[in-house]
Image (cartoon, grey):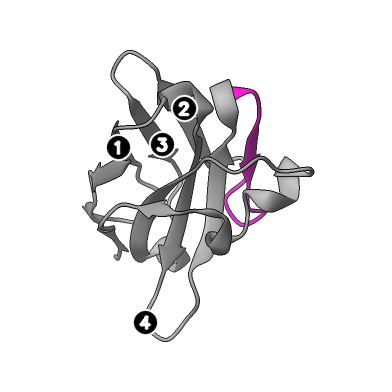
Amino acid sequence: VQLQASGGGLVQPGESLRLSCAVSGGTFNYLHLGWFRQTPGKEREFVGASTWNGYATYYADSVKGRFTISRDVGKRTVVLQMDSLKLEDTAVYYCAASTRAFSAPQLGVRAPSSYAYWGQGTLVTVSS
């Protein structure tokens, strides 16, 4: 499985940005697809994830209500729509894929260690 993230850039607070992650290889519907972000000196942080077949979507509390994850089976992409961006959303954003079966997916998808496949990251800068 290979992932290619795109769409990062520089925006002002309150604006929107749309990140896209193209997935090649693997059976798309059998992949958990997650978004994480990281700033210098900090651990990679869970942003949100879409489980197998898009059955469920989970978000970090810090982005709930502002970010939306969607998956397009035909295009084999997962999109992170980010609205009402804040200064603290500035980070490198990564998409990731997992084929693991979780007994508790709402917890399993939040851990970076659950994902075997990662994209290269795209920088999002929110600045006034």
Residue contact at pointers 4 and 3, CB within 8 angstroms: no
Element under label 3? strand
Coordinates of residue 100 in the picture (x, y in percent): 59, 44
Amino acid type indicated by mark 4: Pro
Amino acid type indicated by mark 3: Gln
Task: Please state, as top left, top right, bottom left or bottom right, where the C terminus lies in the image.
Answer: bottom left
Element under label 4? loop
The span shown in magenta is 54-64
Which residue lies at the image location 63% right of the left edge and 54% below the top edge?
Answer: 110
Q: Which numbered disc, 2 or 4, marks the residue that appears first in the sequence? A: 4
Q: What residue would you read off at disc 4? A: 40
Task: Please state, as top left, top right, bottom left or bottom right, where the N terminus lies in the image.
Answer: top left
Q: What residue would you read off at disc 3? A: 81
Establish if 13 lies above or below 29: below
Q: What residue would you read off at disc 2? A: 70
User: How far apart, in angstroms, are the residues tagged by discs 2 and 4?
Assistant: 27 Å
Amino acid type indicated by mark 2: Ser
Which residue lies at the image location 35% right of the left edge and 42% below the top edge?
Answer: 16
Residue contact at pointers 3 and 2, CB within 8 angstroms: yes
Per the picture, the main secondary structure of the magenta-coloured stretch is loop
Amino acid type indicated by mark 1: Ser
